[in-house]
Image (cartoon, coloured by chain):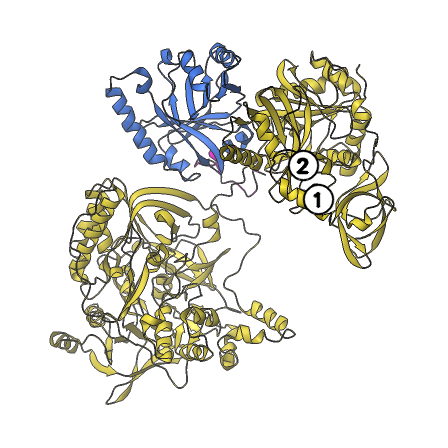
Amino acid sequence: MMYRLPPREGEWINREKRLRFDFEGRAFEGFEGDTLTSALAAAGVMTTARSFKYHRPRSLYSAAAHDANNLFQAGAEPNQRGDALLLREGMSLTAVNTFGGVAGDRAAWMKWLSRFLPVGFYYKTGRSTRAFPHFERLIRRMSGLGRIDADARPALRERRHLHCDVAVVGAGLSGLHAALAAANGGAARVMVVDENTRAGGSALHGAPDAATARAGLQQLTAEVSRHPAIRVLTGCCVTGYYSDHELLIAEHDRVDGGALLLRARAVVLATGAIEQPPVFRNNDLPGVMLGSAAQRLLHRYAIAPGRRVVIVGANAQAVALALELAASSITVVALAMLAEAPHAADASSVAALRDRGIELIEGVTTLAATARGGVLNAVQLTTARVGQRIDCDALLLSTGWSPTQQLALQAGATGRYDSTLYQHLPQNPPAGLFLAGRVNGVYEAAARARDGEVAGQLAAAFASRQPAPAIQRPARAEQPHSHPLPLFPHPRGKEFVDLDEDLTLADLANAAQEGFDSIELLKRYSTVGMGPSQGKLSNIAAARQLAWVTGRGLDAIGLTTARPPYQPISLGALAGRRLSPLRRTPMDDWHAARSAQWMPAGNWRRPAYYRREGLDAPACIAAEVRTVRHAAALIDVSTLGKIDVFGSDAALLLERLYTGRFANLAIGHTRYALMVDESGTVLDDGVIARLGPQHFYVSTTTGNSAAIYREMQRRLAEWRLDCVLHNLTGHMGAMNLAGPRCAPILAACSSLALNEAAFPYLAARLGEVAGVAARVLRVGFVGERGYEIHVPADDALKVWEQLMSAGVQVGIAPFGVEAQRMLRLEKGHLIIGQDTDGITNPFEAGLGGMVKEDKPFFVGQRSLAALRRRGNRQQLVGFEMQAADAPVLECHLVLAQGQIAGRITSVTHSPSLERKIGLAYVAPALAATGTVLSIRDDDGAVHAARVTPAPFYDPKQERQRSGALS
Amino acid sequence: MNAAVNDRAWWIRLARPTARLGLKGPDAPAVLQQAGIAIPTHANGITRSPASALAGLSRCLRLGATEFLLEQDEGVEAVQSLRGRAQTAGLRAWPVIRADFSALLGGTEVMMRLSRLGSFDFESWLAAEARASIASRASTSSPASATACSVVMTLLADISITLVIESADPAAPQLRLWADASFATYLQQTLQFLSPSTPCPTPGVHA
């Protein structure tokens, strides 16, 4: 059982400050500086988790978040990593993936099903289409980590952008030396990022030459922290490496940690190495852990890994670990060195072990652990001479390393297996990325320091675009620190390669025998390396097992692709602030004060309608429609795209961009404009006014305004026309004054002549409205006499208010988008995006008359010619429901002989006509006036409608041209 | 709308020039030069002093090779005069309507706080402007070049903005910001939420 030791020099905990927390309902205490894992370990909690598939008891394993054993639910936050998260006062933790708690997990029976859950069972159960839904439900119920609280208010997680000349990832011996060398080499901004809460890395605890590494570390750390050009970020894990040396960093030591995006000119990766466990029967029991985990517990948190410790080793670190623990008064029963270990204890080590009462067993060929009460109680091992069982409560594994190369591989480096070191090494890093220390295969302390210095100097030179200095890099290690094949298959199995996914050696062998014998296929089929720890402790073992089973070398086997994130990061941290840029018109406050009910329109908000006392929404909308039809009303159309086009080629640009003709548009007139893309699909529409010989004013739909402006700019650059564009959308307010009595209102506010001769339908005039310079367009979208008034945004509210005041006598009212949509539907006017979709061409939409195919050129011309020859596959028609109360909605289908023959795009009850009318795309055979359509509603009921010519209202188009002038 | 976040570390204040004009077109530089304005020699530059180089304007931003934003903080005559000049027949320079939202931002933490909303390297920009400011004070070159500073067009809080540094003093940096006026409320709210004294935004507060 783990326990807290007396205070140690250099420990990371503050014993003056106790922190209370509870785990699975039991109260505990830890110290400030403890992680969740260390606090539970100090309290002697042996079982802290259950495994993913078989619900086996699990506990601390790496103490470095390299495994996914210690995931906790912390309040509403699922899957908090106990190894990384700092303990806070009052935390309430539970284990994830249990049914009834970690101690009495009711799903522990899953272990008896292991023989029925072979590798790839997901795919095998999926073979029966009848059985799969059942299995899918079962699997979904049984699997999944953590619990999402949909009602929880998400914490604000900041996302910050940082920049530096040289980023150093890892604040160990190599990293700190690299940072100092880079800063002294001229880099003005050096950023050191380390996932631990203190700088120092493995130099603080790493055997065997920890003493050498630690010597001078305090001074080095102080020098780095004092350097004005160096900034150290601790508790931050670089989890993604993207192009142009952009690093995604997770603040992972607290629950509400955010994300940092660091862009560097050059990067030094000094990320060290990850200890790789041997694989043997019951290697996942609580009490079994990596040697480096024991070192972290000891040096950082003053925790002993157990009261009777056995170490299984294969390298010099194992020997040093045994001596180090013994020196801390921890009972080490035995050090068992594996057969074929690359390192053998020398005479002095043997003597030292003997002096401390540590039995040295060499040549171990088989290895297994046993349990009592679900936790480790002994290790069984054999050598060539003898087999023996050793009682113990902690089994420490120190048999090899793998470079922490994931970020280097994400950056584009390649991983190569070094058959002399028995480990992979990253090769060929991209320009600007430099490796230092153990990730580079350099192990000895002095060499790591020098390697860091060299990498820092190279990075500083690269960042300042200087030629690389000619510096000799230290040699990589010549002696391996890893066992070549630490796999110990057992006749009774349970040798776990992947603790995340409960995958055993037998599972991987079976997968290979089933034909999944490439490492990428093996990963996908078996899910090895696909759990939360992303194979940090399993990928190498899986590759070794595959190499062993297939008889190939590890170089031929390779490694799976490394992708971000290297360590998990919450979606909230990736999202950062919830930014939703919302545009408001100049009259926004006015609308809000008049009970406007908002609706989104592109990224704007617009009044859908204005609430009236005692009326429901349909009644309010109907009242607004009546006001437009019988009096006068005002709608805010500031959201329309508005673009000025100047220059001698302005007309030519519009001729090419739109299907219509604009070169002959007279000054002071407007024309409907339709835009299609190269395939002839309808993109946008609007009105174009000619305000001068070289000046056109273009309006676009609200949602497309930015895209159309961009397209205009792109085409302008492509065609090199003498033209200047200016996007006025946010700079101009606009309002549409409509209704039979609108002219007198405008006349009261403007000196513009409004009679038919001076200002006919579809004319455009420049003048003053309410004393403000305005562009006034006479248009008729809603089917009544109307004036669209465009003024600078700063003055728009003033103009709006004056028009409203002037209209009081005729009963003017504002109207919203809902009424506008009804009014235009009564006129049969379509809305781009609602009555068209991503494949609609103008002929199908009834806009063929807007296509001037005889122009020399316009975008989409050839496609439209082909489409015209092909004929329509659908046709937009107006229809009228035979039953006014039929519950027919947009997107309901038109049926013919039981088959889909069309769909509704717009439908409404017309207050003006007292009928239910709409627009629908139907097969050409159904498009003739008078055809009866069958429309299916949500409940499957079919309703009759008759194809009716549009416009439904004022078919002779007289009302736009009429209306009182006084 | 209230943009009054005000402390030493971080403050915002609305900036309201009395007149503003955009000028676009191949002849725009010539129009301004003929009016006696020392236009920035390159795009993304600003001239804001001395007064003798601005013909009554308060600042002249060159947003592109042939695109300018002109502002006058007091009076309207200079802007009106330029509008008149540009409308001279035959010139390929068009006065365009500008109704930008503009504000002054400042405080010792302004760059750090902006880095939460935009990926631009604000800190190195400030340092470069400070160096340029020191160099220009030591220089004896023409008045126009003595005040040439950079204009940055970038994304902040997911919208397009234009920024200039008004004061590069690291102890009290100050920026001037322009954005589309329709985003004024959104931008002010978002910037105000950066204040430590302001509670965090609730989801959908902007909608």
SS category of the residue bearing label 1: helix
**Which mark is on residue A736?**
none
Chain identifier, blue in the render: B
Q: Are marks 1 and 2 in contact (CB under 8 Å)?
A: yes
Taking the magenta stretch, the answer to whether it contains residue A339 is no
* N-terminal-most mark, 1 or 2: 2
What residue is rendered at 34% in x and 76% in y?
A552
Report the side of B97 relative to A872 (left or right).
left
Give the residues drawn in magenta, as a range: B189-207
- Bin the neighbour count of mark 1 within 10 Å (Cα to Cα): few under 14, some 14-19, many 20 and up: some
Q: Residue at x 33, y 78 (%)?
A: A487
Answer with left or right where residue A473 lies relative to residue A533. Answer: left
Between the residue at mark 1 and the residue at mark 2, the CA separation in whole angstroms equals 10 Å
**Residue behind mark 2:** A853
Where B12 sits versus A513, above or below?
above
Image coordinates of residue A29 in percent, x first then y, are: 38, 60
Quarter holding residue A632: top right
Q: Type of residue at label 1?
A: Arg
Q: Residue A459 in the image: x percent, y percent?
A: 25, 48
- The residue nearer to you, when weighing A283 against A169, is A169
Residue placed under numbered mark 1 in the picture: A868
Question: Observer-nearest residue: A490 or A391?
Answer: A490
Q: Secondary structure at mark 2?
A: loop
